Amino acid sequence: MSAFSSVNANDAIKTKILELYPQADTNGDGVISDAEEAMVSRQALKRHPKADKDGDGVLSDAEKQSLLRMAANRAKPKPSTTSTDKAKKTPSFANVKYGEHERQVFDIWLADADEPTPLAIYIHGGGFKNGSKDKLKPNELSELLDAGISVAAINYRYLTIAPLPAAHHDARRALQFMRSKAVQWNINKNKVAAFGGSAGAQICMWLAFSDEMAKPDSLDPIERESTRLTCVATAGGQTSNGVEFWSKTIGPLLGENKKIESLSLPLNGESDPKKVRMAMWGAKTLGEANEIAFRHSALDIVSADDPPIFMSYGMSPTDKMPTDPKRVRGWLIHHVNLGIALKEKADAIKVEAHLKHPGAKTKYQSLVDFFAAKLLEEQSTP
């Protein structure tokens, strides 16, 4: 017998809502009230207007049950995917140019929906010198699309092509370009998120924590589009570009007789850490490089009006350094201490921040869960 065949269909509906959407229990009493159920129903109707089969403007119990069955099917565990699975899901539009350089392109997958969909933009990592939009994980792509969230993945110019913050500016332009296509692509430009790891995480946080960068009076209509995000998710993100911060936060993990500069890698033939830093930021002096780096450092620019962030790291604060020397640098530059510092700052200024690492108790288990809550469940009601 179906769970929905109970005599008290309304109770069954509330039970299923609590199971699938625990965040709907806004007062945390473990029960979905009439008001909470009505809120979910209004959000569902706005998201899926065709679910109102009789067109009376409200969802009947049968219509609610139908939507909940679809949601339950989406929530079922999916078989693991491989990197080849992505080839089976062709972008709605591939290699869309948002600039003149060959790397200023993106792919976009549009979710199938009647109403404008939220958009999540993937920004790849790779130390600003490697990586591509093809690094988007197939399972995350599929899960986001299944949830009704459109997905884009961008390329940007490498550090070896143009010094920072060219990569950041490329991502900003791509974001604004996508917003300019909102009507054509059925995108809700007021529900846009970004996600990425490492270097991509840095760019995501810069977009999320920067003040509005739109130019309302620009002759270029794309520049008039907003640069603000609804939420952001990062993996192994470097939350600061400050040398002193890194010396204090990561330095102790290096061990004796090692300086933080030992993590610096050569750039365009230059190996001196100070000169590398200047070249990285396109600066003529170290002071200028530090000033530019400061303006692109999440810890230094985050403020109380910024959007929620979900951070994930692959180690706990007490984990030991890897014994394999080849893994040490990567472990250090993606260390959870970087996320802890941003979480502490965010908590202090009351910016919603979630930090996931092995052993941590978190409200959201994945960026997909986080985005679903922020981009879908928190849609404004009529």
Image: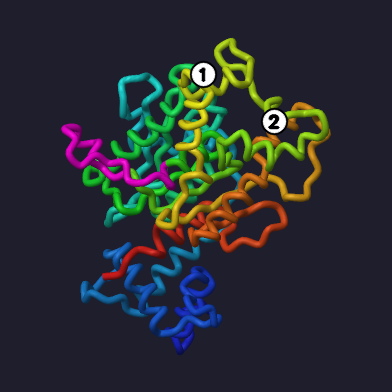
Q: Which residue is mark 1?
A: 279
Which residue is outermost to the bottom? 7
Q: Is residue 7 above or below residue 123?
A: below
- Neighbours of disc 2 within 10 Å: few (<14), some (14-19), many (20+): some
Q: Does 217 lie within the magenta span?
A: yes
- The answer to the question of whether label 2 and label 1 lie on touching residues, with beta carbons closer than 8 A, is no
Q: Percent from the top left, x then y, of residue 319?
A: 78, 47
Q: Which residue is mark 2?
A: 260
- Neighbours of disc 1 within 10 Å: few (<14), some (14-19), many (20+): many
Q: Is residue 197 above or below residue 233?
A: above
Q: Residue at x 71, y 52 (%)?
A: 358
Which numbered disc flags the more N-terminal residue, 2 or 1? 2
Q: Percent from the top left, x then y, of residue 51?
A: 31, 67
On-image quarter of the C terminus:
bottom left
Q: Is 107 in front, or is 334?
A: 334
Q: Amino acid at mark 1?
A: Ala
Q: Is residue 146 above or below residue 37?
A: above
Q: Residue at x 31, y 20 (%)?
A: 100
Colour scheme of this structure image? rainbow
Q: Amino acid at mark 2?
A: Ile
Name the chief secondary structure element in magenta. Answer: loop
Element under label 1? helix
Question: In 3D space, how far apart are the residues under numbered discs 2 and 1 (Cα atoms)?
Answer: 18 Å
Residue 364 placement: quadrant: bottom right
Q: Is residue 297 left or right of residue 171?
A: right
- The segment highlighted magenta reads 207-226
Element under label 2? helix
Residue 236 placement: quadrant: top right
Q: Residue at x 56, y 57 (%)?
A: 354
Q: Residue at x 61, y 61 (%)?
A: 362
Q: Is 199 in front, or is 19?
A: 199
Q: Percent from the top left, x then y, of residue 177?
A: 29, 36
